Image (spheres, rainbow, N blue to C red):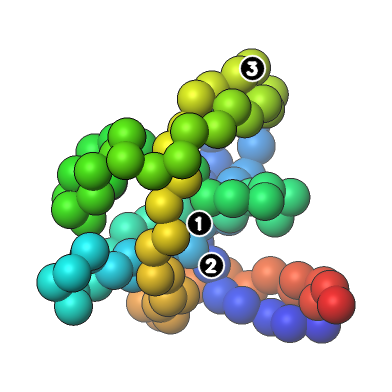
Amino acid sequence: MIEYPYRVLEADGRTYPLVRVELEMKRRGVALPFLCLVDSGANVSLFSSDVADLLGLDLKSGPEKKLWGIGGEVTVYLHRVGCSLLHPTRSEEHTSELQSHS
């Protein structure tokens, strides 16, 4: 098992794991920090168009795809973005046991 510290968001009577990540800006060699919800069952990570703007991406230049989830269907544009996990500060740390998959 892998353990990774995370931050907890409590909303609507549920607990959600959040991790700090850095996403790389296109062609600038700079990474920006974000706090992201972990969806361990997702095949892709979704970010708002505001994040695409901050990263210097031309959102609609990526391949268009339809995705479905609990909220219904959504149109997305796919882009490859470098992503690194950041260790949380001690004040926001919790530990989760994650199963590793091969």
Q: Residue at x 24, y 72 (%)?
A: 31
Q: Nearer the viewer, residue 9 or 78?
A: 78
Q: Amino acid at mark 1?
A: Leu
Q: Residue at x 46, y 40 (%)?
A: 63
Mark pair 3, 2: CA separation:
28 Å
Q: Amino acid at mark 3?
A: Gly
Residue 60 is situated, as x and y percent measured from the top left of the image, at 32, 34
**Apparent side of residue 81 relative to residue 28 in the rendered image (left or right):** right
Is 22 situated above or below 56? below
Q: Which residue is mark 3?
A: 72
Q: Which residue is mark 2?
A: 6
Which of the marked residues, 3 or 2, is nearer the chain's N terminus?
2
**Apparent side of residue 64 relative to residue 81 in the rendered image (left or right):** right
> Which image quadrant is residue 101 in?
bottom right
Q: Which residue is mark 1?
A: 18
Residue 94 is situated, as x and y percent measured from the top left of the image, at 57, 70
Residue 36 is situated, as x and y percent measured from the top left of the image, at 45, 54
Neighbour class for label 2 at 10 Å: few (<14), some, many (≥20)?
A: many
Neighbour class for label 3 at 10 Å: few (<14), some, many (≥20)?
A: few
Q: Amino acid at mark 2?
A: Tyr
Q: Select label 1 or label 3 by which is in front.
A: 3
**Apparent side of residue 6 relative to residue 67 in the rendered image (left or right):** left
Mark pair 1, 3: CA separation:
23 Å
Q: Disc 2 vs disc 1: Cβ atoms closer than 8 Å? A: yes
